[in-house]
Image (cartoon, rainbow, N blue to C red):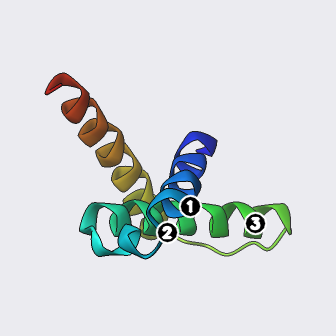
Amino acid sequence: MSIFTLEAIFKIIAQKSQYFKDSWNVFDFIIVALTLAALLLKLASINIEFGSGALILRALRIGRILRLLKKMNGL
């Protein structure tokens, strides 16, 4: 998770407003933001049942990893 967060931060710094014009960057940012929000709620001992939302978030993170692997194989 920290790697994806750092990647998003570095890309935002480097690309500035251009970062949010790429739909994949927006997708990645939403996943990172939702994951960070869930972690903060957990750290604050706020028990909110996400149900299937947590499962969907995990699936999106796995999809993101698979997309990165596919991109690396194309190099």
Q: Position of residue 25 (x, y in %)?
A: 35, 62
Q: Which of 20 and 45 lies nearest the eye of the viewer?
A: 20
Q: Tell me whether circle 3 and circle 1 mark residues in contact (CB < 8 Å).
A: no
Q: Nearer the viewer, mark 3 or mark 1?
A: 1
Checking the image for residue 13, the label placed there is 1
**In front: 22, or 17?**
17
Q: Amino acid at mark 3?
A: Leu
For marks 1 and 2, the one nearer the N-term is 1
Residue picked out by circle 3: 40
In three-dimensional space, the C-alpha distance between marks 3 and 1, rounded to whole angstroms, equals 23 Å
**Residue at the image point whose x is 58% and y is 44% from the top:** 1
Mark 2, residues whose alpha carbon is within 10 Å: few (<14), some, or many (≥20)?
few
Q: Hey, which quadrant is residue 69 in on the image? A: top left
Residue type at the position of mark 2: Gly
The residue where tag 2 is placed is 51
| Residue under the image location 54 percent in, 68 percent down | 34
For marks 1 and 2, give the one nearer the viewer. Answer: 1
3 and 2 marks in contact (CB < 8 Å) = no
**Amino acid type shown at disc 1:** Ile
